[in-house]
């Protein structure tokens, strides 16, 4: 073990190669898992849509299901890393992944052929759960679990593994964009399900490889904690929930708005979701492509532009109106996700951080996808979801000062 440690910590070419192989071994399943996760969403939704006449509300309910399953998967990952950390979690999660294989290939579960005349939203959630619940749950846990495993290796980048979340969302983005352009037009649904099952089995092998590397690495839990590590408070958790809820709610709201009030174009919902994923990639990259300060400066005028478009309707072309809505959504989602990345906790609180993010996403999705359509007779959730955004920069400054003060107190107490 000591020899392996020295080989990774040295600066020889062999040590550099070992680091690259270690990183690649973790990046590959993260990207593949995210790709499978976001490929199954449009694939299975397309199976369900004909039974509802292609109604846009089906996708809104589907997003709520996926956010719920994501929350459950993140909660499982958090529980596993807390009560069966490191090596024990490998065996447990591989067991869950293998169990999910028996639910493949992806298809509509037996007994869910005819939707009821009322309560279709709950029926849809039951249909999704019975049909793809277990595979989706297993996939949802992979991103936080793999990041937590990577943080326990002796790779130099393990001290800040959040960049792997950007890699995860790259996989999600590529799958989402490629599905309607490359996969859906040329591959039959039955073949899509079979290829997806092959990818799922390949993922199990890659996870096992990550497990082997984790077993061969020293247990990072035995290392001394950094003096700057500050445990998140409930105020931090509430802040993360709010930052995740607003863009998630906006995602459902803007999708419903452009699908009903702008243009009823099939698969138009792909654009907002693709932008949503892209903001995670930008925000959690090791070097953000777009500076966060620039996003904060652009956000107020973009909100003003949205208000002008909604109230005065100055743009008469569908493409122009669509561009404005998507641009405003992108900037606001990037601002919120940039704040999430800026206030992320130390790696040992990583799974809790993602759990609160998923909780916020679910709250936003339920509010705009399930509750709002029964309360309003128009897409009122869209302007309502945008209302908290102007206040976030001020909250940002307050939370930043509070976090800095806690870190100073932690450093003083350890001295």
Image (cartoon, helix red, strand yellow):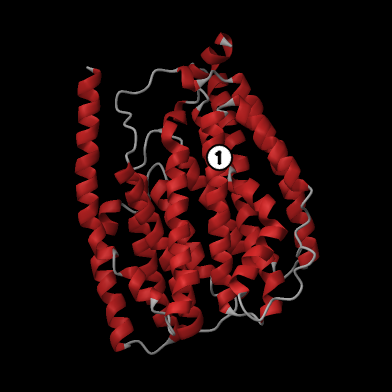
- Compared with 377, 16 (above or below) is above
273 vs 198, left or right, is: left
227 vs 316, left or right, is: left
Quadrant containing the C terminus in the rendered view: top left
Q: Please state which of residues 255 and 102 is positioned toward the viewer in this rendering.
A: 102
Residue 31 makes an appearance in the image: yes
- Compared with 38, 258 (above or below) is below
User: Residue 110 appears in which quarter of the rendering?
Assistant: bottom right
User: Residue 386 appears in which quarter of the rendering?
Assistant: bottom left
What percent of the width, then of the height, locates residue 57?
A: 56, 76
What percent of the width, then of the height, locates residue 146?
A: 56, 37
User: Residue 393 appears in which quarter of the rendering?
Assistant: bottom left
Quadrant containing the N terminus in the rendered view: top right
Q: Please state which of residues 155 and 336 is positioned toward the viewer in this rendering.
A: 336
Residue at the far bottom: name it.
316
Q: Residue at x 48, y 39 (%)?
A: 351
* Mark 1, secondary structure of its residue: helix
Q: Residue at x 74, y 41 (%)?
A: 98
């Amino acid at each position: 073990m000591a020899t392996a440690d020295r080989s990774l910590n040295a600066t020889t070419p062999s040590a550099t190669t070992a680091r690259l192989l270690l990183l690649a071994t973790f990046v590959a399943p993260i990207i593949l898992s995210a790709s499978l996760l976001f490929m199954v969403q449009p694939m299975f939704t397309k199976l369900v849509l004909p039974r509802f006449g292609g109604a846009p509300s089906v996708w809104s309910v589907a997003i709520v299901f996926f956010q719920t399953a994501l929350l459950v998967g993140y909660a499982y990952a958090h529980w596993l890393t807390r009560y069966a950390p490191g090596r024990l979690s490998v065996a447990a999660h591989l067991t869950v992944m293998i169990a999910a294989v028996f639910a493949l290939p992806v298809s509509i579960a037996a007994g869910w052929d005819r939707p009821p005349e009322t309560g279709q939203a709950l029926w849809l959630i039951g249909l999704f759960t019975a049909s793809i619940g277990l595979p989706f749950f297993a996939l949802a846990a992979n991103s936080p679990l793999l990041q937590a495993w990577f943080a326990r290796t002796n790779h130099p980048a393990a001290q800040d593994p959040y960049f792997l979340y950007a890699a995860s969302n790259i996989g999600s983005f590529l799958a989402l964009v490629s599905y309607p352009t490359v996969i859906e037009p040329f591959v039959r649904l039955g073949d899509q399900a079979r290829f997806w099952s092959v990818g799922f089995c390949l993922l199990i092998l890659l996870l096992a490889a990550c497990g082997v590397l984790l077993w061969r690495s020293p247990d990072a839990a035995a290392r001394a904690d950094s003096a700057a590590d500050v445990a998140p408070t409930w105020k931090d958790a509430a802040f993360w929930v709010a930052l995740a809820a607003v863009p998630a709610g906006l995602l459902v709201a803007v999708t419903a708005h452009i699908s009903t009030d702008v243009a009823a174009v099939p698969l138009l919902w792909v654009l907002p979701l693709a932008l949503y994923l892209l903001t995670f990639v930008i925000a959690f990259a090791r070097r953000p492509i777009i500076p966060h300060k620039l996003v904060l400066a652009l956000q107020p005028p973009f909100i003003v532009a949205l208000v002008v478009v909604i109230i005065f309707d100055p743009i008469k072309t569908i493409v122009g109106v669509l561009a404005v809505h998507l641009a405003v959504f992108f900037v606001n989602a990037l601002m919120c996700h940039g704040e999430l990345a800026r206030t992320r906790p130390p790696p040992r609180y990583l799974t809790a951080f993602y759990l609160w993010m998923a909780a916020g996403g679910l709250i936003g999705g339920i509010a705009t996808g399930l509750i709002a359509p029964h309360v309003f007779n128009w897409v009122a959730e869209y302007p309502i979801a945008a209302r908290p955004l102007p206040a976030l920069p001020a909250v940002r400054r307050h939370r930043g000062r509070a976090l800095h003060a806690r870190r100073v107190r932690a450093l003083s107490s350890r001295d």
